[in-house]
Image: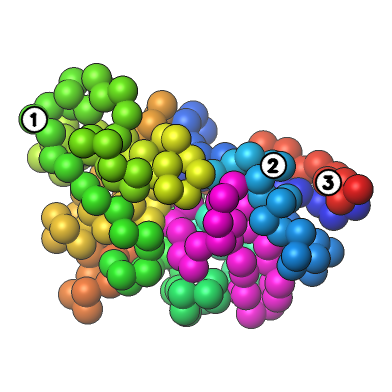
């Protein structure tokens, strides 16, 4: 039975919040034809299969589809590889080469705004308006809503129903898209207590990062 590492990514400084993530460091133990079903069975917003830990080759699945780039899976996987194997300067999901770095207690990855799924963002008038949402704005199936909560802080919620997720706790890919839209450093407070640092770079790429914790390692039966 392969080991499944269960993480929470983009926690606050006390380890609260964060988006659950499943990572199989020995991804080759899970046949490619089974991976979508395994991700659906686990039920997290994303599950990662590491096919080459030395080179950082990974696949990422939501409960419904495979995706080429996603923020919280790559941040979490970079952190876990540094903890369990070796820190890498690059991960290689299907989208392309993703630079990574460790900065104290936080892990950062860099993405192109066109790599994540095409999230639509809606700016609302207040954090209270974001809190009051009962679903995606205007019925969209891949959307986020945000409002300014301070000079460099936004309150956000993300609803990626198209990916098989009603509401996501912390969405790095959507943060990349929002960072490109805002064009400035910002801290996103999403979900029940998750925190995402967003830093647009001069070359047009967007760096996102945050804290990760390991909740458990468990055997996963493929039977």
Upstream in sequence: badge 2 or badge 1: 2
Write the start and end of the magenta stretch as one range. 46-72
Q: Which of the pair 13/59 is nearer the observer?
A: 59
Q: Residues within 10 Å of mark 1 (few under 14, many from 20)?
A: few
Q: Which of the pair 206/146 is nearer the observer?
A: 146
Q: Position of residue 1 (x, y in %)?
A: 90, 52
Q: Is residue 204 left or right of residue 52?
A: left
Mark number displayed over residue 220: 3
| Residue at 61% from the left image edge and 74% from the top image edge | 56
Q: Position of residue 140 (x, y in %)?
A: 28, 42
User: Is residue 158 visible to us here?
Assistant: yes
Which residue is disc 1 drawn over? Answer: 125
171 vs 125: above or below:
below
Marks 3 and 2: CB-CB under 8 Å?
A: yes
Which residue is disc 2 drawn over? Answer: 42
Question: Which element type, helix, strand or loop, lies under badge 3?
Answer: loop
User: Marks 2 and 1, how far apart in space?
Assistant: 36 Å
| Residue at 42% from the left image edge and 35% from the top image edge | 167
Upstream in sequence: badge 3 or badge 1: 1
């Amino acid at each position: 039975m392969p080991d499944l590492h269960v993480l929470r990514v983009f926690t606050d400084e006390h380890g609260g919040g964060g988006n659950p993530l499943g990572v199989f460091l020995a991804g080759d133990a899970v046949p490619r034809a089974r991976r979508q079903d395994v991700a659906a069975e686990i039920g997290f917003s994303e599950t990662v299969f590491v096919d080459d830990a030395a080179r950082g080759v990974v696949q990422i699945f939501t409960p419904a589809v495979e995706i080429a780039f996603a923020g919280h899976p790559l941040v979490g996987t970079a952190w876990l590889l540094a903890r369990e194997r070796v820190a890498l300067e690059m991960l290689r999901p299907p989208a392309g080469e993703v630079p990574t770095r460790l900065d104290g207690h936080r892990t950062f990855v860099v993405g192109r705004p066109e790599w994540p799924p095409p999230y639509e963002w809606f700016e609302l008038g207040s954090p209270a308006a974001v809190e009051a949402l009962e679903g995606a704005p205007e019925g969209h199936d891949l959307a986020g809503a945000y409002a300014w909560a301070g000079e460099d802080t936004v309150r956000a919620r993300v609803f990626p129903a198209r990916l098989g997720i009603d509401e996501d706790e912390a969405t790095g890919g959507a943060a990349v898209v929002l960072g490109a839209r805002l064009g400035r450093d910002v801290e996103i407070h999403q979900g029940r207590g998750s925190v995402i640092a967003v830093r647009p770079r001069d070359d047009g790429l967007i760096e996102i990062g945050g804290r990760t914790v390991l909740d458990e390692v468990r055997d996963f039966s493929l039977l």
